[in-house]
Amino acid sequence: MSIPKVSIRQVKAARALLGWSQSDLALRSGVSEPTIKRLEASDGPLGGRSDTVEKVVSALEQAGIIFVSENGEGPGVRLRKGVI
């Protein structure tokens, strides 16, 4: 599975669209809350270990998030149809 490159801002925007807290993301991704807090405290690309990135991105995608890559207007996120 190819994990898209996402930014911290995209992760925060995805959480906002879903109405998730950092605790919610930690619970659903299997990544500790302190790790989520540490990752979100920075800016730029989502860093950390590759398995951590995969867990975070996968949890958000399974919840209905679509990560939009750079397309001339900049990267972003949106909800898949039928979610929420």
Image (cartoon, rainbow, N blue to C red):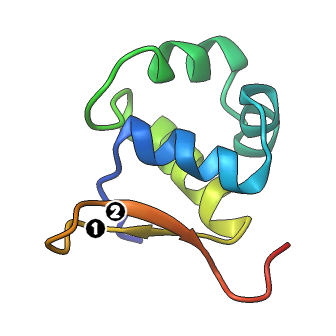
How many numbered discs, if any? 2
Q: Is residue 57 above or below residue 37?
A: below
Q: Amino acid at mark 1?
A: Ser
> Is there CB contact under 8 Å for labels 1 and 2?
yes
SS class, disc 2: loop
- Determine the CA span between mark 1 and mark 2: 8 Å
Looking at this view, is 38 or 81 the one in front? 81
x, y (%) of residue 42?
36, 17
Residue located at (68% from left, 71% from top): 64
As drawn, is 70 to the left or to the right of 83?
A: left
Image position of 51 (left or right of 61)? left
Q: Which residue is mark 2?
A: 4
**Residue for badge 1:** 69
Q: Earlier in the sequence, mark 1 or mark 2?
A: 2
Residue 41, label in figure: none
In the current view of this chain or complex, which residue is farthest to the left? 72
Residue at coordinates 70% horizontally, 43% vertically from top-left? 29
Q: Amino acid at mark 2?
A: Pro
Query: Looking at the figure, which quarter contains the C terminus?
Result: bottom right
Q: Check the image and report above or below for 47 versus 42.
A: below
Residue 23 on image: x %, y %: 80, 27
Q: Image quarter for residue 27?
A: top right
Q: Which percent across, then down, holds residue 48?
A: 37, 27
Q: Secondary structure at mark 1?
A: loop
- Where residue 65 appears, x then y in whole percent? 60, 67
- Residue 53, picture quadrant: top left
Q: Residues within 10 Å of mark 1 (few under 14, many from 20)?
A: some
* Quadrant of the rendering where the N terminus is positioned: bottom left
Name the residue: 52% across, 53% down: 57
Crowd around label 2: few <14 · some 14–19 · many ≥20 (10 Å): few
Q: Is residue 3 left or right of residue 14?
A: left
Q: Nearer the viewer, mark 1 or mark 2?
A: 1
